[in-house]
């Protein structure tokens, strides 16, 4: 995430978690594409993530990137 730079938005939640949002819009001759990635950060650790309009990236930061519907183990209490 560091290589992506400053997020487009950041929200601090009442429980101390932070939501970071990265957005990108691109265009081709016929379409406009909007990619949005959101991360819930707790104590410096990514606890949940989602993305839309970004295609299906195979690897992010050297690790597999799973669809938003994939549960993250150990995060049932979020």
Image (cartoon, grey):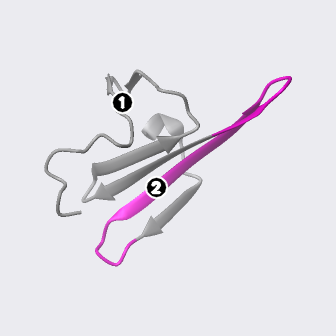
* Residue 43 x %, y %: 24, 59
Query: Up-down: is 37 above or below 18?
Result: above
> Whole-percent x and y of residue 31?
79, 30
The local secondary structure at tag 1 comes to loop
Q: Which of 49 and 30 lies nearest the eye of the viewer?
A: 30
- Identify residue for label 2: 20
Dot placed on the residue nearer the N-terminal end, 2 or 1:
2
Where 62 sits versus 77, above or below? Answer: above
Q: Tell whether 46 sits left or right of 3.
A: left
Name the outermost residue toward the bottom.
14
Disc 1 target residue? 65
Instruction: Tell me if residue 59 is in the magenta stretch.
Output: no
Give the number of the mark in front: 2 or 1: 1
SS state under label 2:
strand
Q: Is residue 6 left or right of residue 71?
A: right
Q: Are marks 2 and 1 in contact (CB under 8 Å)?
A: no
Residue 44 is left or right of residue 21, and the answer is left
* Residue at 33% in and 23% down: 62
User: Which residue is the extreme one toward the left?
Assistant: 74
Task: Give the number of marks.
Answer: 2
Q: Left of 41 or right of it: where is 33?
A: right
Specify few, some or many for label 2: CA neighbours under 10 Å numbering under 14, 14-19, or 20 or more.
some
Between 74 and 60, the one nearer to me in the picture = 74
Q: Which residues are magenta?
A: 13-34
Quadrant of the snapshot with the C terminus = bottom left
On screen, 29 above or below 71?
A: above
Q: Residue at x 38, y 42 (%)?
A: 68
Residue 27: give its label: none
**Quadrant location of the N terminus in the rendered image:** top left
Q: Position of residue 57 (x, y in %)?
A: 46, 25
Say above or below: 37 vs 75: above
């Amino acid at each position: 995430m560091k290589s992506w730079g400053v997020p487009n938005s950041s929200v601090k939640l009442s429980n101390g978690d932070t939501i970071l949002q990265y957005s990108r819009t691109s265009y081709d001759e016929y379409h406009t594409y909007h990619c949005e990635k959101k991360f819930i950060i707790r104590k410096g650790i990514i606890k949940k993530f989602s993305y839309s309009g970004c295609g299906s990236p195979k690897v992010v930061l050297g690790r597999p990137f799973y669809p938003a519907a994939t549960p993250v183990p150990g995060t049932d209490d979020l």
